[in-house]
Image (cartoon, helix red, strand yellow):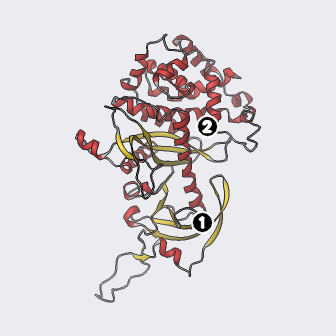
Amino acid sequence: MAASHLYALLRVLQLVRPAFTEPSFLRFLVLFAGWVCSGGTHAVTEALVAAGVSGVQHHAAFHRFFSRARWSADEVGRLLLLKLAALGPLRLVLDDTLCSHKGPKVFGLGSHLDAVHSTRAVHVFCFGHVWVTLAVLVQVPFASRPWALPVLFRLYRTQAECQRKGIAHRKKTQLGRELVERVLSWLPTAPVELAADEAYSCSTVLKQLPQRLVFVGAMRPDAVLTRPRTHRCRSPKTGRWLTRDVTVPKPQALARDAALPWQRLTAFLYGQSQQVDCKEVVARWRSAAGERMLKVVVVRMTGGSRPLRVFFCTDASLTALQVVERYAFRWSIEVLFRDLKQLLGFADSRARRRLAVLRTAPFAGLSYTLLVLWYLELAASWQQLKLPVRPWYTTKATVSFADVLRLAQATLARARWHSPRRLRANLRAASRATHPQERAA
């Protein structure tokens, strides 16, 4: 069983083999195994110790893998995206996260607003890196919620740093739009659905998107909405023909309108069924989405500081229930950020050089995707992959990423990573080994 798990993992890792040269791919395997098996702070040297390679192969070669080697994190993400696109309808989620760092001469380091520790009254800033991340939502058989698997990353640099370096400043939304356009260029005909929060529901991301991309996002309660005129008429003041759209009540005015009753829906949100009171309207949001007709859903909140939340979708044929539930799936990327930082060392990198900074954190994120893809390979018999016995946790019935990581650490610990010859032999054996489902067929 242990050998079959290792061979399945090596087969998944070979999905990204075309992105590397032969020597770089062997180092990638060693770093992947060591990074996954590392406990505590993750670093290149810790990964070499965990993989049993320290003292056998020189550590400088593995540092050069991040700072000088010829490979692209985008190309690795492209190969993973093509694999994920073959699993079913492509649903994407876009967001950014802050990784706190300190130290002189670190590339891309800046002072950023810490959204977790800030409030409306007090803004907390800290030094670090902000990563704009695009992930693919995948409904896995071993969990009740979709999982967000990251494929593309961009480092956001502050305006002050860009002025010091004499380079053009790019906003987070511009970086997010670049990631979306890259996916659309890789999949020129596939329908795509994208979910993002209010920060990315703006004209930079939304305008001139192709019709095959359906965007689900959030808007301000005071957004200006309009609709096309259904018949021609003249202005009562000037007598000229009116060509502009007719103004629709703003979402906050729509919520106060007693003539339009609230609809009560039962939605599956964040793992449980909830009652949702909402109102809906089909309108344009010209300042952000241009000419596209949107399904706008106003939701009355029963808790929190916001009395209303307003969601929208560029596919006006969707129901209000579908819009609310699809936006709620966006929360999977927040779970992803937590798992990456706490379990896989996404924020632990102490790299300083440009290429090393731009590659180390994405390496951790792409490793997350590879691990989940491997676990999906074992999904046919995942019930037999016994979870740890927790008598104090009787309600746990699904798999978390901590469980995936634990199984991966046990699997990788049995392999010998210090010998390139043995590693090549394992790769050949993994290529010859067939999937359990293929043997059953």
Q: Position of residue 73 (x, y in %)?
A: 43, 33
10 Å neighbourhood of mark 2: few (<14), some, or many (≥20)? Answer: some
Residue nearest the viewer, comparing 80 with 98 = 98
Of marks 1 and 2, the one in the foreground: 1
Q: Viewed as shown, does residue 339 lie left or right of 210?
A: right
Residue that mark 2 sits on: 401
Q: Residues within 10 Å of mark 1 (few under 14, many from 20)?
A: few
Q: Which residue is mark 1?
A: 302
Q: Residue at x 48, y 35 (%)?
A: 346
Q: In this picture, is 97 found above or below 272? A: above
Of the image marks 1 and 2, the number of the one nearer the N terminus: 1
The reply, left or right, for residue 187 in relation to residue 88 is left
Looking at the rendered structure, the kind of residue marked 2 is Phe
In the rendered view, would you say 82 is above or below 285?
Answer: above
Residue shown at the point (56%, 78%) measured from the top left: 260
Q: CA distance from mark 1 to mark 2?
A: 31 Å
Q: Which image quarter holds the C terminus?
A: top right
